[in-house]
Image: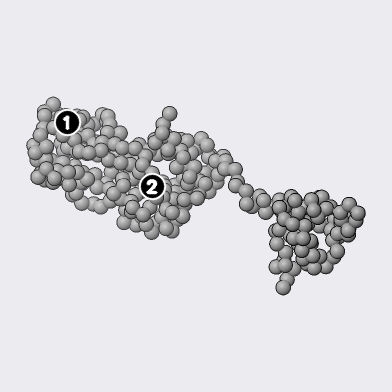
Amino acid sequence: MSGINRLDIKQLRVLKLLLQERNLSKVANIMGLTQQAISEQLKKLRYTFDDPLFIRSSNGVIPTLFAESLEPKIHKILSEIELLLSEEVFNPKNLQGIFRISTSDYALMTVLPKLLKRIHQEAPDLKIILRDFESDNLSQLMVNGEIDMVMTFPEFIPETYPSMLLFQDKHICVAGIDSPYLNQQFTLEALSKLPQLVISLSRANLKGSHDAWFAKKGLKRHIVMSIPSFSAAPDIINATNTIAFLPSRLLPHPKVNPLLISEYPPHFDIIVAWHHRLNNSPVNNWILGLLKEIFVNPH
């Protein structure tokens, strides 16, 4: 058996304390052991180092020259072990590297400006990469570490992923600023017959998030257009004389105005999600803390 395998941390602590106290009974009291147990540890140390280490005296023990030569080395080893086991003080100013966020353009407009302002102020050397939301490849991207955090709607995130609710929003039905539909009161049945634009974030199709809500009321929407972006919606709505449901946090907008309708769809949630591998990540938890401070519990 090699020397390193015959030595453990407890023996190093015994040796350190014996060098300080020079008394077996005092060391036993400090470590909460019996004097016999300390004697056994000293016996193992003598065998490991092939040196008496301590000579008995009337008041305790006296270290050999070799034992005294070990003191600074033992102190350094134990200090480094304590540093290894101690919790490192987190300071965002020291953060470097890259943090990758996947987001829809809705979150890009409503969440990211405030978040990125705080990150840039408090962690100026942390680089941020924003990428489009990809629902089909989400799990693979997160497992591979190509995405650290996702900000989107709950229906796009697997339930197994840890997540945090940021806020709720509601949809407002809008038309272009010169639309003939303005200043009229619409029932849902009448509204369903108007030409509608939907924002399809995950797939390019003529399906919208409120189709099921209309269907529960026995109605089918007259969807004529699908686009992948909230940011482009107001200009297109205004140019094509269509109507659409837009999140209230994206309004008001100079190109669209709200319609008068009899009933609005339920509120929806915006969440942030991440992979289990980042549960103990100081950077991830710090950014989650910022999001909580800005959106969940704002002052």
Residue farthest right in this picture: 58
Locate residue 13 relative to residue 177 in the image: left or right.
right
Could you say which is closer to the camera, residue 68 or residue 21? 21
Expressed as whole percent of the image width and height from the top left, the position of residue 66 reads 86, 60
Residue 258 placed where, x, y %?
20, 30
Residue linked to disc 2: 163
Label 1 sits on residue = 259
Residue 95 in sight in this render: yes
Mark 1: which amino acid?
Leu
Residue shown at the point (67%, 51%) measured from the top left: 82
Q: Which amino acid does label 2 sit on?
A: Ser
Q: Where is residue 90 in the image (x, y as percent from the top left)?
A: 57, 43
Describe the element under mark 1 as helix, strand or loop.
loop
Residue ranking furthest to the top: 183
**195 and 45: which is toward the camera:** 45
Residue drawn 43% across the image and 54% down it: 276
Is 240 in front, or is 29? 29
What residue is drawn where x is 40% and y is 56%? 141
Chain-order first, disc 2 or disc 1: 2
